[in-house]
Image (cartoon, rainbow, N blue to C red):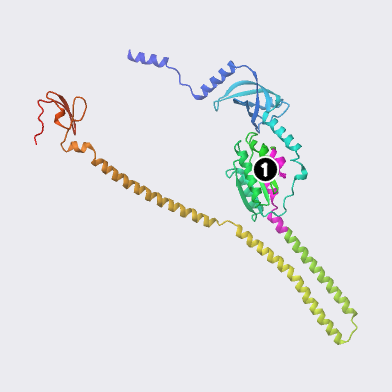
Amino acid sequence: MMEQRQAASLETAPAVLPVSALNTAVARLLERSFPLAWVSGEISNFTRAASGHWYFTLKDDAAQVRAVMFRGRAQYAGFTPRDGDRVEVRALVTLYAARGDYQLNVESIRRSGTGSLYEAFLELKARLGAEGLFDQERKRQLPEFPRTIGIVTSPQAAALRDVLTTLKRRAPHVRIILYPTPVQGDAAVPKIAQAIATASLRAECDVLLVCRGGGSMEDLWCFNHEAVARAIAGCTMPVISGVGHETDFTIADFAADLRAPTPTAAAEMAVTPRADWLGRLEMHADDLQRAWRRRYANAAQTLDWLARRLQSPAQRLERERLKLGAMQLRLAHATRTPLNLSRLAIAQLETRLRAQLPDIDGQRERVSHQAHRLHSGMSCHLRDRRAALATLAAQLELLNPQRTLERGYAMVIDARGRTVRAPGSLHARESITLHLAEGSVEATLAAVQPRLD
């Protein structure tokens, strides 16, 4: 009978569902409960995959939901939405079982007006443009040979690594100054403007790069504020804006003296490659050498022409030979001096270039020394703490009441749970509790005898 009851309970027990089966069941429930419906919102984080599918977030002021529009439906949309566009989508509510994400499966999409962020962008652009802040006459030319370049961006930004790599590759002799600032969020706006103002006030660089990597319209919005645009326009040195990707445009791009499609492109625009300068210098040296050869050849031809016209006696001929020797020495000296000066200038530039290369071995040795000091300090600290802990444990063990009980003493507790310290607080036939080292004893007093001194 017991076995039959166990078999019956197993048959009536609920089945254990795998996660995939649970998500599939929830997706079917959502699709049956919510028919096709029109949903309005603003596009954000729009991505077009290589397969042709569209992935984006549809949001309003209070909430957001992920959405997908497959290629077969997207090709009939008639337009490609962008971040900030306000749209209406006809979609089916479903669940993406692989991740367990609730999403909208969009079948059709139509415009419902421009998003609020883009409207604010156009309004600010029109207002600043009417003030003449974006006029081409205000734009300044970049210096042909900048010696110092300033960068306004976040020290943690990937764009900074790209810019530094590009500058090191193209012009390792250029000095770089970083003006650190956060580059995302409303709190970053005054800090970006302050960093640009600081660079303008110090006037320690020839070109200023304001850059940030790509992101959504919300991520780049701190570069669409009036304070940043006015800080760029009021900067004392030329400013190159390299914010986002090639398709991203911000108010900072219009206010800057030059707009770069990416941060890397901004670094490339700021400097001419060192190889180009060396090639141009070598070309000038070749031109100079050819000019001196041509001058020497002309002088030699003139000398031959004059020699053929000589009709003087031997003394005059000797005098003319001396004059010719002097002219040859002057010509040789005049030819060698510019070449030596050019070689000296090239050697000085090479020496300056080698001085700018970082001392990697010294930095590695410094880091190793600091790590050794840290390890030694931690070892000493742990040893001191262990010794202090052992001392405290020994003191605590000495004060342990259990040790006192183990030496034969007992602790007396009266019926009211109070510790008895004098016989005067006890009475005959009163119950007491004696706590010993290995347990307790309940006892009743026959009599109480005060201590006689």
Q: Residue at x 80, y 77 (%)?
A: 327
Q: Residue at x 79, y 76 (%)?
A: 328
Q: Quadrant of residue 213?
A: top right
The residue segment tinted magenta is 251-279
Quarter the C terminus occupies: top left
- Magenta span includes 255: yes
Residue 419 location in percent, x, y?
20, 30
**Rendered view: 327 above or below 411:** below
**Rendered view: 20 above or below 331:** above
Which residue is denoted by mark 1 in the rendering? 231
Side (left or right) of 67 relative to 364: right
Residue 423 location in percent, x, y?
14, 30
Q: Is residue 416 visible?
A: yes
**Rendered view: 174 above or below 51:** below
Amino acid type, mark 1: Ala
Q: Residue at x 53, y 57 (%)?
A: 361
Predominant SS of the magenta segment: helix
